[in-house]
Image (tube, rainbow, N blue to C red):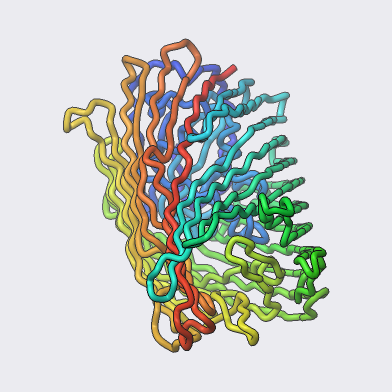
Amino acid sequence: MLCFGLGCLMDRRIRLAAVSSACLIMAPLVSAEPVQVCENGSCELTYQTSFFDRYAPVTALDMVRNLPGFSLQDGDQNTRGFGGAAGNILVNGERISSKTEQPSDILSRIPAAEVERIILIRGQAGGVDLAGQTVIANIVRKSAGRSGTWSAGVGLTQPDTVYRPRGEVSYSGSAGPLQFTASAELSEFQGLVEFDERVFSAVGAQTERRDEVFDEIGYFYVGALTTSLDLGQTDIGFNVAYEYFDEAGGETSIRTPTGELPFTLFQGDTDEGEDIEVGFDIERGFGEDLSVKLIALHRNDDFQEAGTLVRVGTPEGDITDIETLFDSVETEQILRLEADYSGWEGHVIELSVEGALNELDSDFALFEVENGVLTRQVVPGAQTNVEEERIEVRLSDTFQIQGVSIEAALGGESSIILQSGGFEAERDFFFWKPSVTLSYAPNERTQWRARALREVGQLDFFDFVSGVNLGDDQLALGNPDLSPETTITVNATYEHRFGEIGVLSVTGFHDWIEDVEDVLPLQGGLEVPGNIGSGSRAGFRGEATIPLDQWGIVGGRLDLDAEWQTSSVTDPLTGEDRELSNEREWEARAEFRQDLTQQNFAWGMTFFAFPDFPRFGLDELEDRGGRADLDAFIETRALSGLRIRLSVDNIFRQGDQRDRRVFDGRRDQSPLLFRELRDEARSRPVTLTVSGVF
């Protein structure tokens, strides 16, 4: 039964008791036409599990990734609080009450055999607990049963020749009203990139050639447990997650100055991190019209990094010129209350109140050679403590007027930030955050959606902290006077669906930005993160899923995704209009796959391309990041109960290009000092994975 907004709040939580032990990986292909119902501007498109049989899913993630016209968003786990970390996924009508575990992580640990169906919610229906999202995938799980998933594989990072293992296992089960999913993952990984860099003088003469290789090897471990207890009118959830990684390596640079003997520099880098999260939530329904949920979370993230800059093979041996040490501990406590009320006829009222305490303790040490001895340097802001107390309130009403579904919301955010250590500062902020979202469906296949809202960015605590970039020999200072970037966004989307999987979606958007975050100049030739005034961006996004059967490619589909934008801000040095730093003008992606169900075989490829993005510093200009390459995979399901997949990424090993121009002082007043041109060859990861269910 499909239900829209009014009086259906408790049904949207989707407590089903269906039991099935079907193994989706080898299920026979049956009629799988999705069912769509649109009412008052909102649409729900229901996909039964048989729709996904052609893709031989092992996990719920495999299913979601093949939803036509849906782009999975994991949210931003680095944002403080739950607001930006939610993504666009619901499980049994509930948002995922975790931050360490991204929605894609959670989905990868839900066996496909445990999925009852997937509902694609488009437009504003009310009561879905994901503010601001207009396209949401709700994964409805079966209420009983026991099953698990596993995967094991090896990866090769070409041109290296060492095979590195990886594996993951998850198990879901139930005991009466208790459901649980336990999982573990471990992998060995490698980062490998080759560079060819040339340095030129101001007049264009080559002064140095650099042959560089970045090689880093690491280990990654994850363990997680998610539980839910259904006590009738009350649901209780608990989750715990642990992540650990350790990686070491660095960049070896063989430098050959023109007319001189070559020498070697090694930039070492060792990282280690540990992340622990514990979450709890309890939800209770009060009659048919009111539901209240309380979420509590504690998170601790410990990170250490050590860097070195070493001259290798000198007559005196290897000489360390610079050492850096960085240690940080981030903690977060969140308490969030959500209430949904549908007792007012024609309306769904949602209230959320969230309080959060965040803290960052960091210590940065820089040692440079003085008189042959490594000596600690004085760096402003090297030892820093940042604390934030924040509260956010949001009240929304979803209703319909003449076939148009409308969500009108008013929110407010108040925070106090205290900084001590190298910089002493105390600041408080308050922002109103209004929004309105509309959706209209003239028929079952076409929908219009529009939004207008004010978004408030979060200050990155690490922008308050000083550090160093050894590769570019730059000191990166923190700035205690940063203000959050705020954006007024207006966008409109047209979506049309055709056939069983065909989708065309086009979105136009315009953003007005206040307090644009970039870099500001300081005296002494230094720069810090800072606010440079007002700016804007505007553009279009397009997505399409095209079935290829009508062109003779049986079981084929093509997914297209592209975006183009233009942006503008006043440069703080030149006073002239320019584009925003670190934002690309366009990007494009085309993914083809063909599933031959009779042969138990699938194959596909993904082409992607995007141009350079600019960076505007105090004494330099940089363009970097342009790439175009191809990924491909083949997959067989010929062995009973197993899926064997071979994938190759970055087939042409195309890497980011870099053009860095450094000036002898401020770039608006000084002549060019030198120019660096870097060609990058990324590694070609080759991965063989075997996965199945039990």
- Which residue corresponds to the image point at 69% horizontal and 25% vertical from the top-left? 174
Q: Position of residue 207 (x, y in %)?
A: 46, 65
Q: Where is residue 454 in the image (x, y as percent from the top left)?
A: 51, 72
Question: In front: 465, or 54?
Answer: 465
Q: Position of residue 233 (x, y in %)?
A: 69, 41
Q: Which residue lies furthest to the left in this view?
A: 551
Question: In front: 233, or 368?
Answer: 368
- Which residue corresponds to the image point at 52% horizontal and 84% vertical from the top-left? 666
Q: Where is residue 219 in the image (x, y as percent from the top left)?
A: 68, 37
Question: In front: 349, or 412?
Answer: 412
Residue 66, placed above or below residue 328: above
Q: Is residue 212 visible?
A: yes
- Which residue corresponds to the image point at 64% horizontal and 87% vertical from the top-left? 523
Residue 340, placed above or below residue 94: below
Residue 246, placed above or below residue 153: below
Q: Can residue 296 be seen in this view?
A: no
Q: How many marks?
A: 0
- Where residue 684 sits, quadrant-wise, is top left
Question: What is the quadrant of the C terminus in the image?
Answer: top right
Question: In front: 123, or 455?
Answer: 455
Question: What is the quadrant of the N terminus in the image?
Answer: top left
- Where residue 248 sits, quadrant-wise, is top right
Question: In the image, 457: left or right of 133?
Answer: right
